[in-house]
Image (spheres, rainbow, N blue to C red):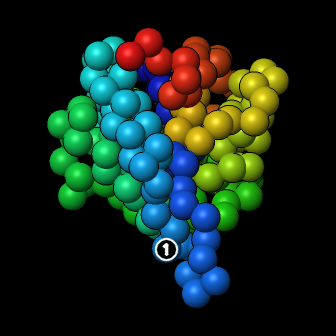
Amino acid sequence: MEKTLFLLRHARAAEKTAEQQDLQRELNSVGLQNSTRMGINFEKNNVHFDIIITSPAVRAKTTASLVAEQIRYDTNKIHVNEEVYEASPRTLLQVVNQLKDEWSTVLIVGHNPSITYVSEYLTNDEIGNITTCGVVKIAFDMDSWKQVSEGTGKLVSYEFPDSLNF
């Protein structure tokens, strides 16, 4: 059975203030709009997820929630994974390898540089810096997420807000 992984970098966030922790940064107006647009894009393309996993950062959780609302995914079922925040590429790969095999289509909302590094590592493609609210779709011809490793994925698409036609 094929596995499909979507790696989504959180949408644009407000600048960090002096008294604010990085985890607490919220999306700015552009980020709010782009998250909703990306969700609409998923819905238009009939993309639905078995699970949505997000970093605990407010900007990532908000991105995940806005996307989920557009595809009618229960936002209460979004799984917050502490390891996704400030994850090294190795840690993010471990998160992927630990996914349940019953899940065939997964969305992980995280941060750069790990989103870009892992996308390139899994596909052996040079994608370049994934923009805020950019999403990479990677297909794997395998039955288990444990088999996912360097070069085992096929880059299906890379979309970002400015590439959407609406």
Say which quarter of the image contains residue 70.
top left
Question: Who is closer to the viewer here, 99 or 117?
Answer: 117
Residue at 23%, 42% in the rendered image: 69
Q: Residue at x 53, y 39 (%)?
A: 133
Question: Residue sitting at 34 percent across and 37 percent down?
Answer: 36
Hey, which quadrant is residue 88 in on the image?
Answer: bottom right
Q: Which residue is mark 1?
A: 24
Q: Quadrant of the C terminus?
A: top left
On the rendered structure, is 44 left or right of 101? left
Rendered-image quadrant of the N terminus: top left
Residue 108 visible: no
**Apparent side of residue 54 relative to residue 134 in the rendered image (left or right):** left
Q: Position of residue 12 (x, y in %)?
A: 54, 49
In the image, residue 23 sits, relative to residue 134, either above or below, namely below
Q: Position of residue 22 (x, y in %)?
A: 60, 73
Q: Amino acid at mark 1?
A: Gln
